[in-house]
Every structure is written in C-alpha cells, then in structure tokens.
Image: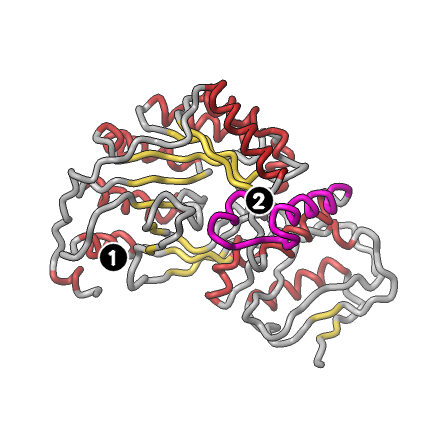
C-alpha cells in the first residue's frame, strides 16, 4: 500500500499542518498518510486544531483509503495554527426536504447551509458531509456550503399548486444562524418569504444572530406562526467551549431565550444532547435556567453517534476526558443493545434501558416542578397563502 512519508527535518507542527492543507485540497485523498514513528510522543493527542471541535479530519465512509498521523519524536510544543473557514456556493434544485420519521414532530425542513462552523463535536449531522466528498471531521466545520438562491427556490416550491402547508422546521441539520449567516443573510431572506405567505415555522438554533430577526419572528408569533428552540448542552462554559467551540456560551444562549420570550416568541429549552456521566447530571439545572429565562416548553435527547460521529466523539473523549471515556461509552452502549448507536425509530433519540428511563423520569419530574410543558400548541396553517412568483422563478423547476 502506498504511503506518503514526511521528512523528519521539519517540525511536527509544520508537517501535520501541511498534510491537513493537502488533504483539504484533495491532494492526498487516495493515499494513507503516515508520520513514520521513532518515539511516540505522549502529548500527540493534545495537538488539536484551535477553536475546532473534531480532533481529526478522518476519511468518510465513501473513501476507499484513509490517512492518519503518527508522531516521529521531533519535539514541537507550539499549537497547530487555526484552520480557516472556507465557504463555497451551491444553487439547490429544491430546498424542502421531507421525512416520514415517527420520532420527529415535523415532516419537512429546510437548511440554508451545509456544514456548520459551530463545530459541535457530537453533531449527528456530520455524516451528511460525506455526500459532498468531504470529511465529517474538520471539513464539516471548516468547509461550508452556502445556498444564496434558497429564498427564490423556496418561494417557487411554496407556489406549487400541489404544495400542502404544514409546519416547516429550520435548523434540524445545520444551524441557520451559524456565523456565516452574518455575511450571507440567507436565513433572513427565507424568513421574509415565509412571513409574506403566512407559513408556520419552527426554528432550532444556538446562534445569537436570531436576535437580528426578532422583528420578523415576533410578527409571525403574534399570528401563531413561529416558535424557537434553543439548545443548551451544559451550563459549564469550559465544557461548552470544548464540545461546541464556536457556539455562543451557555449564558449567552439563556440571554437569547429571554430576549425572544420578551418579544412574545414561544421558546423551548432543549437539553440536548445529554451525555451520560458528563452532562446529564445538569439536566434539572438546564431546564430551570431555561424556565427562568422565559422558556415555555422543554425537551431532551440523548447523545447520538451515527456513522462517523462515533469515532470522532471517541477521539474527542480520549483527548479531553480520557478518565471518563470508558464509562461514557459503556452507558451509551447499554442503551443501544451493546452498540455505539441504534438507528431504529423509537430507539435513536433516547435509547432504551434503565439509564434512559431514569433520565426520562428525572425530566418528567422537573417539568412538573417547573411548570414547563413537553408539547407546544399546534401552529396555524389556515392563514397560508401561496406566494406570487414570476415565470423566471418557476423555471427553476
């Protein structure tokens, strides 16, 4: 099998970063890359990319070969330089995605972006980047795809005679209010389309940019057309920084809840994902903090590790919490029949078994004590009016 050998005269930092750059440009996609090892340095695993969630840029399930790095004994104490975010543009043929999952309270969703700069290491959407020929690892959080034509495509889809209105979920795969929304404004443009035709929406986000759109969301909420879910994984800012390196702090997310609620927008506090033996002890505290900030409803989901997320998550554990890694994975496997993840409907969101039942029991007790609801009232669909669209827009289809 072919290998790429890195000259030992270069330092660890220079050589590893060079390989990251080459691999991101696709120049090493077909060759496994190895640093020839003379003396394995004990701190190899601490050399993570700055302000990024994933530890590596492992190949996706569609790549025939893989690449990895090994220390060769040349000392280098400097951190790796920060990986820059790259954004490409895509014109989608369609925007609305439909699903038939009984686990989900919606049957359709849109995503203005592919990939997410928040870099949450646990994100279940990471495997979707493999469809683009990119890694679910660092590529997912550094190689993003923006869809500026999304508002026009959405307008044309809503204008179809065959379209039947139902609540449209936004942010179910990647965050619509991630940092690049500040430059592209795609989410706000989509909201303008949806508001104009009185279409009900449910948004999930961690991004503070949602506050920019309070004007639109407040008007829609007054007509029973909008609600927002804010996910809070932990109240510990250090742990949040490690798991969600470019997402707002927990305190800042609670401020988001307060500002949205004060504007009359129904908000859900989402204690998700709960990580056994790491964040699940905070469940009640997260729910109480959300309630105090103005949330009306609440939900929780157990950590999910589909496809490439499992090895990425375990790499992250080995770097940041090696003392808890075996315990965390043991509890997750107990909830999924001995596997890292069970994708079956009815199992994937919360798992099964005594531990999952205990967390659910605690959740129910906390809801009752705090006066939170698990389900929100249905939103109105009777106000929907198909948008007007010209022939040029319709020609997209």
Does 300 sit above or below residue 371? below
- Which residue corresponds to mark 2? 352
Q: Quadrant of residue 195?
A: top left
- Which residue corresponds to mark 1? 153
Q: Is residue 383 left or right of residue 246?
A: left
Residue drawn at point x = 46 percent, y = 34 percent: 299
Callout 1: few (<14), some (14-19), or many (20+) C-alpha neighbours within 10 Å? Answer: many
Magenta stretch: give its range: 323-350
Q: Residue 33 in the image: x percent, y percent?
A: 69, 71
Q: Residue 345 in the image: x percent, y percent?
A: 47, 51
Q: Quadrant of the C terminus?
A: bottom left
Does 89 sit above or below residue 187? below
Query: How did the renderer colour the structure?
Result: secondary structure
Residue 274 visible somewhere in the drawing: yes
Q: Residue furthest bottom?
A: 1
Q: Is residue 134 left or right of residue 32?
A: left
Residue 188 in magenta stretch: no
Residue drawn at point x = 63 percent, y = 38 percent: 355
Residue 347 in magenta stretch: yes
Comes first in the chain, label 1 or label 2? 1
């Amino acid at each position: 099998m072919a290998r790429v050998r890195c000259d030992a005269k270069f330092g660890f930092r220079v050589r590893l970063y060079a390989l990251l750059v080459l691999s991101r440009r696709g120049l090493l996609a077909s060759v496994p890359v190895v640093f020839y090892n003379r003396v394995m340095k004990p701190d190899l695993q601490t050399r993570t990319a700055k302000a990024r969630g994933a530890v590596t840029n492992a190949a996706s399930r569609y790549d025939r070969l893989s690449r990895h790095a090994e220390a060769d004994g040349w000392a280098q104490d400097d951190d790796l330089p920060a990986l820059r975010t790259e954004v490409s543009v895509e014109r989608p043929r369609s925007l609305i995605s439909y699903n038939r999952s009984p686990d989900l309270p919606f049957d359709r969703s849109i995503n203005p972006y592919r990939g997410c700069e928040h870099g949450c290491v646990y994100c279940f959407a990471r495997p979707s980047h493999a469809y683009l020929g990119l890694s679910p690892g660092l590529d997912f959080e550094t190689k993003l795809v923006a869809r500026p034509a999304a508002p026009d495509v959405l307008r044309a889809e809503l204008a179809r005679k065959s379209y039947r209105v139902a609540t449209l979920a936004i942010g179910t795969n990647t965050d619509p209010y991630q940092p690049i929304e500040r430059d592209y404004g795609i989410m706000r443009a989509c909201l303008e389309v949806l508001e104009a035709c009185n279409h009900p929406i449910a948004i999930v986000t961690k991004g503070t940019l949602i506050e920019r759109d309070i004007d639109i969301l407040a008007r829609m909420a007054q007509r029973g057309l909008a609600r927002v879910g804010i996910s809070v994984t932990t109240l510990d800012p250090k742990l949040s920084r490690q798991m969600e390196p470019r997402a707002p702090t927990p305190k800042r997310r609670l401020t988001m809840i307060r500002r949205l609620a004060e504007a009359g927008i129904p908000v859900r506090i989402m204690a998700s994902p709960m990580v056994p033996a790491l964040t699940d002890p905070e469940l009640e505290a997260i729910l109480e903090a959300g309630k105090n900030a103005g949330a009306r409803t609440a939900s929780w989901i157990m950590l999910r590790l589909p496809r490439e997320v499992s090895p990425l998550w375990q790499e992250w554990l080995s770097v940041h919490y090696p003392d808890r890694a075996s315990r965390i994975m043991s509890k997750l496997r107990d909830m999924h029949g001995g596997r890292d993840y069970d994708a079956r409907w009815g199992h994937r969101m919360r798992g099964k078994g005594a531990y999952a039942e205990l967390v659910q029991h605690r959740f129910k007790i906390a809801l009752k004590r705090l006066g939170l609801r698990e389900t929100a009232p249905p939103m109105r669909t009777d106000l929907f009016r198909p948008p007007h669209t010209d022939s040029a827009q319709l020609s997209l289809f």
